[in-house]
Amino acid sequence: MFNYESYLRLDKFPLIWCSGCGDGIVLKSMIRAIDKLGLSKDDVCMVSGIGCSSRLTGYVDFNTLHTTHGRALTFATGIKMAKPRLHVIVVTGDGDATAIGGNHYIHAARRNIDITVILFNNFIYGMTGGQVSPCTPKGKRASTAPYGNFENAFNISGLAQAAGASFVARATVYNAVQLEKLIQRAIERKGFSLVEVLSPCPTAYGRRNREGTPVDMILQQKETTVSVAAAEKMSAEELEGKIITGVLTDVERPECREEYQKLIDSFRKEG
Amino acid sequence: MAEEKKIKVLTGNEACAEGALAAGMRFYAGYPITPSSEVAEVLAEELPRLGGVFIQMEDEIASMGAIIGASLAGTKAMTATSGPGFSLMQENIGFAAMAEVPCVVVNVMRGGPSTGLPTLPAQADVMQARWGTHGDHAIIVLAPFSVAETFDLTVRAFNLSEQYRTPVILLLDEIIGHVNERVTIVDPGSLEIFNRIVPSDPPDQYKPYRHTESGVPPMIAYGEGYRFHVTGLAHDETGFPTNSAAEIGRMLERHHRKVEQARDHIVQVDPFMMEDAEIGIVAYGSTARSARHAVRLARETGKRVGLLRLKTLWPFADEEIRSYIGQVKSWIVPEMNLGQMAHEVEWALAGSAPVTRLNKVNGDPISPPEIYQIIPG
Amino acid sequence: MAEETLRRKREAEITINTAWCKGCVICVELCPEQVLVMERGKAKVAHLDKCTVCGLCELRCPDFAIVVVDKNKSPKTGE
Ligand SMILES: Cc1ncc(C[n+]2csc(CCOP(=O)(O)OP(=O)(O)O)c2C)c(N)n1
Ligand code: SF4
Ligand code: SF4
Ligand code: SF4
């Protein structure tokens, strides 16, 4: 239906991800979105942190950068500020972005710098074997929460919204068509844009929490999510335990690099 | 054609900022910290005028990440900090070493550990500059002793980082950072500037980590049609992660070789009255100022003493020190730490001459009389 | 001619790259028409005639291992 080959580094295949890992579905959606937008591969710079999801940058034929744990947004900020014509896309996990990289995450959103973040939320630290993440729901098990997580989880999208992001959306791999469209809109929107994707990790999260097979986990996304439109008509009680998907924020706001360019230009005129 | 020369009175921090601009630095990311903040303040004002970028990041980890990103995008980039911030930068300095990304990190040393002595000088980050990040890695570290030399060595730091594709650390200390001195600013056009070598291969043949004879692979920026991969994982010539022991060994060996085989070009010392010296002082940074003074005082009383001042701290000037074996009978190493470089001097001499340490870590600079007093004879 | 194009029947061609397929069963279980089965840990086409070329299997295969094309339509290509 879609030929992905020209966007892939085929000699690096097969993907390192586990059987049934949702990350590959997100990767495909990202490629379709970029293709729809007609971006030149030379103008796309994809930057990732450390984690299973962050391995993605090794497989795509763009300008790619696999950085240090939690710091992808800092490298991406340097790239965008230095070479604003590049479309900078950051790939990051829930631990990468909101634990070790939490500070960079809120600051990049605050600056509203034109970076698109695709945040793979699998509720766990996948790469290191299933330790608890700031996004692990309360009560769920992890290797470092053997009796169930006693902490509260972050609302990742809410964080970006509160910090000042231009575009915030949540999606699932179950609805990969919507996911693709949201990624497309996120890239199109100037400013900091986030797509939080719920991406099942059957190995480190699913097994430990008896979530069933990869198929069960994907189908479960259909049950636990409600669209923004549907959520508007639901009471707080009905929304209990539900995850809202769709566009949560989409506003035009001054963008960081453009604001800086105005300053540079003001000196050019002067001089 | 007369060279245009301007005399300016600057602090070391200001000279550092000016030197960076003269070297072509057009991207600065940093986080404020005493005693380095003036570097950022000057650049916040100057960079937008020159079409460059200044950004104050949320911390030093972010600053280091941002300059690596900017450098990969093709812009000469730097950050400046002091002890606590330097500690935070270490992981990403290792990334720059591993991924061979040119960049300059300025550390205006203050007393530590921890928050320590924010406004007082120290030279206690010498070993951290060498070994601060985990893993074996090559590194270049320079230490100026005057404001004028801060300008020159900042330019040199950029040249070396571009030439050898490596992070270069410039160690100032609070005294050099804040002292006011006259500097002759030369016409930027007359400066020797080295820019990274770009590949001559077409994109489909480009290997970002090619094993060249010099050990330095040509480097192209992101967004120029080459589409390569950069990672902090052990990688092969193509830049992609590898598990091959042979490839990993070859790459790490090359990282060391590219600096080691160029050590004669990189290492600079400034011998002062060393021709007939029987007593040698090894010093660097602001302590070398006191040492020079002490040498003059001692010479007046007829003592044959000289100063071998280190401008490059790493790679270490072992050969230069060893060249005095036989002539210099004893050495003195004064430094504002508990003997970090003295250890290296002892190692270089391998017992061929005694080394006396003069150490101070209370925030007081080492004065000329303090050095003078321990000069034997 | 135009009418003929409109009336042209969909005709599926499904390719499974067994070297990449990790046997996650996602394609098999989420195919609305039960076209696919598992065989020795890999996905396999069992009832090609039932395929409606909806593309759901390809869309959700995490490993780029299954490709569906409508033989009567040229595939969308990248770039
Ligand atoms: C500074 C540092 N601390 C810890 C690690 C180890 N580490 C690697 S990945 C990871 C967590 C990844 O989890 P997440 O970001 O959620 O990504 P996932 O693997 O689930 O996709 C950790 C803790 C590291 N590489 N660097
Ligand atoms: S551990 Fe989880 S997140 Fe990592 S590859 Fe496996 S399934 Fe995916
Ligand atoms: S295209 Fe649709 S009907 Fe055909 S095999 Fe795939 S999921 Fe089943
Ligand atoms: S979804 Fe892909 S990887 Fe999974 S069984 Fe089907 S073809 Fe194989």
Image (tube, helix red, strand yellow):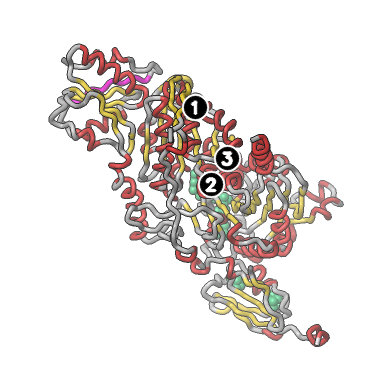
Q: Which residue is mark 1?
A: B14
Pinpoint the chain carrying mark 3: B
* Residue appearing at x 75%, y 43% in the figure: A253
Residue shown at 65% from the left, 72% from the top: C77
Q: Which residue is at the front of the view, B21 or B74?
A: B21
- Percent position (x, y) of residue A45? 58, 55
Q: Mark 1, chain letter?
A: B
**Identity, as a three-letter code, of the amino acid under mark 1:** Glu
Q: Are marks 1 and 2 on the same chain?
A: yes
User: Which amino acid, by three-letter code, is at mark 2?
Assistant: Gly
Segment colored magenta? B354-361
Task: Label 3: state its secondary structure.
Answer: loop
Q: In front here: B238 or C43?
A: B238
Q: Quadrant of the C terminus of chain B?
A: top left
Q: Is residue B303 left or right of residue B122?
A: left
Look at the picture and state if B7 lies above or below B265: above
Q: x and y percent of residue B337 in the render?
A: 34, 24
Mark 1 and mark 3 on one chain = yes
Q: Say which element carries label 2.
A: helix
Q: Which of the two discs, 1 and 2, sits closer to the camera? A: 1
What residue sits right under mark 2 in the picture?
Answer: B69
Q: Look at mark 3 in the image and give the residue it sits on.
A: B52
Q: Seen from this angle, which residue lies furthest right?
A: A233
Task: Count residues near mark 2 (Cα–Cα under 10 Å), then give few for <14, some for 14-19, many for 20+.
Answer: many
